[in-house]
């Protein structure tokens, strides 16, 4: 197996990755707070998880991955009270929307999606352990973590706690690095109607940071090989996770490798709900943008580089997909009955080189730029071989090239291999126009065939007073 290197945020260095069990690499990723639609900045963090998963698998590892659902926090309490709904009622549709979005951008389903509200016993267990070690104190019936009593506080974010005044506290989930204080583990109810649990450590609800420590414990009964999240979570969220988990279980390694994905920017600023400069996936899809182009854009910039979102970049991304698909279609047109084999053995020396270069690039901290350079170089060569009239390529060779695309697609998942491809909006528009024309010309066989083709693709045509409209089922 090839040696893999990751940039570990804990050490700030590229390090050799050596999980205890390569057949089961454990990965935990901070997931969505389900109080709204995810914006595509959030989606970048989630698609990084998908890219990491697919890369590990391509490199020969087995994976066991978790993404949590934060279904209780300050914002959820605020918004559910305003909506006069229970936490469960309020978060259910947003959780469903999150999974729908993942499906739209072809993110693979992970092994576990624990919910914070279903992990309260594990939270209590951690607090009890921290209490026994003298790391917890109570104030106004809430419980706080005393960071000065925990020797390693600051090791991830490299903050210096020496100037900090003891006993100053934060009740809110988020705060700035410049203003480091003790953080809340368990909050006593403050607002009328607030969700709370009656437990042996008191009536209250968890602080956000505690949730992730507890869900890791719940799923793995130990630490994990890799922990991911967006860079904004490094402090205080991940620093506090370390304090809780290593404070409670000092004999164990909590996280082997920390990977932090960079932000998606709009006009140079972080995309965020609070700044109001955000797009949801649905906004973009409604404008007719192909979700594949969004997926490809979000995964094709290295995870540790900022990515400036723009319609030009989306267009570039759609063009890249088109180039790959066109080349693949040339091969498929000549081999219409070929079926992809899942464990194909390549023999062609050029393909073996491209495959090796792809794997070496991924093994170098997921260097996607190098992977793309290999992909587009191979594309150029395959196209020129297909162009050659003098030396037409053999069927065997064409099949091997199709398999090469299937191999690349294990990472990208933006290519279509069957004759029945997903239709994009402009293709649907022109089919509908053609159908109208066929009906006008009383060519009902053709118009019915088009209707059936659209139906098979889940496109419904509706006659409205403003004319024909279509929608996806
Ligand atoms: P949230 O739902 O706010 O808890 O965030 C979910 C994930 O999205 C976290 O990993 C965040 O770090 C990440 N995130 C938030 N904003 C951005 C952004 N503009 N670009 C990339 N990742 C982001
Ligand atoms: Zn988390």
Image (cartoon, rainbow, N blue to C red):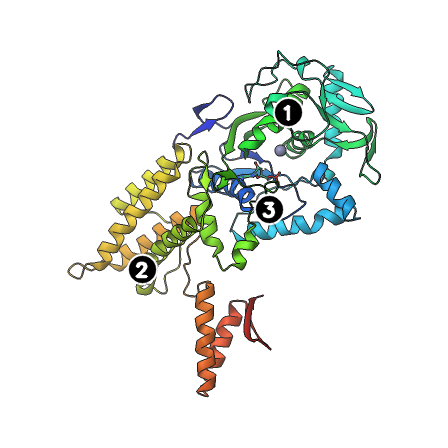
Furthest-left residue in view? Answer: 390
Residue 239 in the image, given as x and y percentages of width and height = 60, 24
Identify which residue, 112 or 372, lies in the foreground. Answer: 372
Q: Which residue is mark 2?
A: 331
**Foreground pick, 352 / 369:** 369
Instruction: Identify the mark at residue 136; answer none if there is no mark.
Output: none
Evaluate if marks 1 and 3 touch, with contact meaning CB atoms under 8 Å apart. Answer: no
Mark toward the viewer: 2 or 1: 1
Q: Dot 3 lies on which element?
A: loop
Cβ of disc 1 within 8 Å of ligand 2?
no
> Which residue does the image show at 81% across and 33% down from the upper left?
190
Is residue 78 found left or right of 350 in the rendered image? right
70 vs 13: above or below = below
Classify mark 3 as within 8 Å of ligand 1 or not, answering yes or no.
yes
Is residue 85 toward the left or the right of residue 240 in the image? right
Within-10-Å neighbours for mark 2: few <14, some 14–19, many 20+: many
Are the residues at dot 2 and dot 1 in contact (C-beta closer than 8 Å)? no
- As measured in the structure, the alpha-carbon distance from the residue carrying label 3 to the one carrying label 2 is 38 Å
Residue 124 visible in rendering = yes
- Is 59 rendered above or below residue 169? below
Q: Within 10 Å of the Cα at label 3, are there few (<14), some (14-19), or many (20+) other Cα atoms?
A: many
Indicate left or right for 105 with 96 as reference: left
Q: Quadrant of the C terminus?
A: bottom right
Q: Earlier in the sequence, mark 3 or mark 2?
A: 3
The picture places residue 265, in percent across and down from the top left corner, at: 49, 40
Residue furthest bottom as drawn: 442
Q: Which residue is mark 1?
A: 240
User: Foreground: 209 or 289?
Assistant: 289
Question: What residue sits right under mark 3 in the picture?
Answer: 38
């Amino acid at each position: 197996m090839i040696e893999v290197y990751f940039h570990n945020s804990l050490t700030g260095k590229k390090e050799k990755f050596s999980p205890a069990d390569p057949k089961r690499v454990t990965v935990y990723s901070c997931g969505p707070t389900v109080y709204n639609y995810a914006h595509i900045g959030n989606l970048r963090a989630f698609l990084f998880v998908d890219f990491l998963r697919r890369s590990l698998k391509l490199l020969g590892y087995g994976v066991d991955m978790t993404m949590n659902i934060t279904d209780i926090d300050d914002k959820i309490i605020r918004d559910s009270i305003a909506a006069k709904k229970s936490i469960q009622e309020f978060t259910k549709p947003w959780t469903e929307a999150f999974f729908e979005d993942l499906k739209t951008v072809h993110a693979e389903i992970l092994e576990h999606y624990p919910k914070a509200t279903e992990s309260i016993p594990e939270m209590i267990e951690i607090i009890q352990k921290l209490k026994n070690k003298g790391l917890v104190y109570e104030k106004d019936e809430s419980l706080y973590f005393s960071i000065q009593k925990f020797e390693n506080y600051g090791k991830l974010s490299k903050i210096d706690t020496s100037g900090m005044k003891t006993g100053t506290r934060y009740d809110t989930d988020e705060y700035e690095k410049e203003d480091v204080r003790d953080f809340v583990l368990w909050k006593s109810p403050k607002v009328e109607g607030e969700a709370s649990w009656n437990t042996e450590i008191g009536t209250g609800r968890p602080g956000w940071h505690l949730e992730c420590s507890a869900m890791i414990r719940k799923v793995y009964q130990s630490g994990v090989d890799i922990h991911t999240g967006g860079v904004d979570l490094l402090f205080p969220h991940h620093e506090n996770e370390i304090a809780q988990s290593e404070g409670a279980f000092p004999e164990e390694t909590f996280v082997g490798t920390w990977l932090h994905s960079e932000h998606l920017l709009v006009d140079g600023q972080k995309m965020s709900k609070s700044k109001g400069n955000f797009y949801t996936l649905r906004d973009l899809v409604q404008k007719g943008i192909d979700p594949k182009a969004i997926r490809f854009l979000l995964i094709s910039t290295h995870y540790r580089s900022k990515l400036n979102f723009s319609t030009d970049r989306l267009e570039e991304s759609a063009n890249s997909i088109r180039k790959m698909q066109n080349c693949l279609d040339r091969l498929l047109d000549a081999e219409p009955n070929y079926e992809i084999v899942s464990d194909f053995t390549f023999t062609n020396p050029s393909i073996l080189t491209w495959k090796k270069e792809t794997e070496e690039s991924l093994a170098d901290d997921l260097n996607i730029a190098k992977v793309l350079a290999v992909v587009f170089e191979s594309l150029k060569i395959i196209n020129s071989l297909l162009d050659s009239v003098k030396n037409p390529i053999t069927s065997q060779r064409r099949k091997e090239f199709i398999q090469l695309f299937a191999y690349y697609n294990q990472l990208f998942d933006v290519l279509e291999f069957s004759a029945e491809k997903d239709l994009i909006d402009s293709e649907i528009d022109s089919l509908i126009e053609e159908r109208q024309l066929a009906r006008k010309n009383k060519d009902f066989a053709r118009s019915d065939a088009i209707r059936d083709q659209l139906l098979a693709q889940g496109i419904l045509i509706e006659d409205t007073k403003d004319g024909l409209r279509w929608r996806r089922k």
